[in-house]
Amino acid sequence: MIERYQTPDMRALWSDLARLRRWWRVELAAVRAWEARGDVPTGTADALDAAERAAPLDDAFAERVAAMERDTRHDVVAFTRALTERFGEPARFVHMGLTSTDVVDTAQNLALVEAVDVIAADLEAVRTHLRSLADAHRDTLTIGRSHGVHAEPTTFGLVLLGFDAAAQRDAARLARARDAVGVAMLSGSVGTYAHVPPDVEAHVADALGLTPDPVSTQVVARDRHAELAGTLAILGTTIERIALEVRHLQRSEVREVREGFAPGQTGSSSMPHKKNPIASENLTGVARLLRGYVGPALEDVALWHARDISHSSVERVVLPDATTLAAYALRRTATLLERLVVDADRMRANVDVLGGLVHSQAALHALLRTGLTRERAYELVQRAALRTWEGEGTLRDLLAADPDVPLDDDALAAAFDVAPYLAHVDAIFARRGLPREGS
């Protein structure tokens, strides 16, 4: 199912061949840096570039590297040997002064930056749907719920606008996480630049659109990657908030929204009437996975001294999976929002389904304005509310019939008017950069 929502860019990004091509970009940029210093014969980088263009790194090359790795038990050694085999004499300058992690970490960070850019674009698509739906339903009265129980009226537009506000924060966190992982490191075996000067690192970073890591060991510090994992986990919770709202509102006794149901779609193998919130349930599960990657990412931060490889096996799973799942979840969320069916009439009906109980706070305030103490006013409204819960009448009628309640018809009418719940909606939308059209 994931493949339906993946675009070729994210699928290809984490392929073995793409990984080798990123390694090649790092190695070639390093050769150019050495050449600029005069430490490599002029024209070496161009010769290597031309050789690769004439015989591009392809699936056959990836298979050759894999075959060599079975003997060397070292992926980068297999890679450099395969380059020598393919490109000959100029390849002797490849990997000069570098250690394996210089190449692997820099290339991996390059992949992560590209992955974050894909995710950020997918997030922006979700935000476009959220803002469009929110604007369309800014005046759609619905019941606000706390603890799953009716609280006070709000609008469905405001509910959606809150999701967009969270998504905007996700976008800001993504940008920060992109900066965190967007570093190049070519500092040698323990980060001292003993065999490769800092200007080579700076040259490579600039060529790849990265920033030199100011301090490294033999690896880029993994708090950077943990920050990205945490960011994706929080993004997953935003997606889950949206999904959970749809799941609750699609329940049969609520029926305020529902996922789109395509022609020919079935909801159950045994019950032909079923329309289930399958996309929302799927997204809830994906959010659990995204949160699950945070623990291993945090465990990767504390390595032995300059490095060990306990993080490597974790990252081979966590980084491709978390970024791919985040993109998948966002694309499925965008589809969910695009096809969402909103029943405004049902929402309005549900506002009144409890006999006016949702106006209890307004009634309380009306009584306070008559001079009653808060305790006495609360007692009177709660007494009527409890009778309303028992089906003895509406809250307004019971208050009107109570001789202890000093409210006339006009005061009661004002207390049960929905207008106050809509009064500041436009102001909230304006704060989010969505003023009412024509205002």
Image: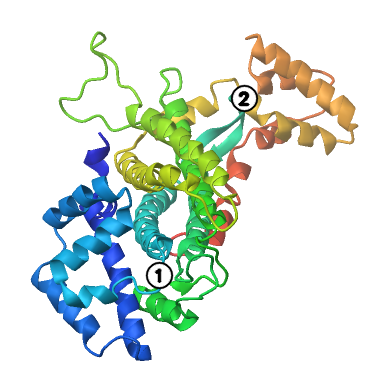
Q: Is residue 112 above or below residue 89?
A: above
Amino acid marked by disc 1 = Leu
Location of residue 124 by image quarter: bottom left
Towards the viewer: 300 or 398: 300
* Distance CA(mark 2)–CA(mark 1): 73 Å
**Quadrant into which the N terminus falls:** top left
154 in relation to 73, above or below: above
Please tell me the numbered disc located at residue 98.
Answer: 1
Could you tell me the amino acid type at mark 2?
Gly
Q: Nearer the viewer, residue 134 or 261?
A: 261
Instruction: Answer few, some or many: residues within 10 Å of disc 2's Cα (few below 14, many 20 plus, some between 14 and 19).
Output: some
Residue 404 position (above or below residue 431): above
Q: Secondary structure at mark 1?
A: loop
**Which residue is more in the foreground, 133 or 79?**
79
Dot label at residue 356 = 2
- Label 2: element kind: loop
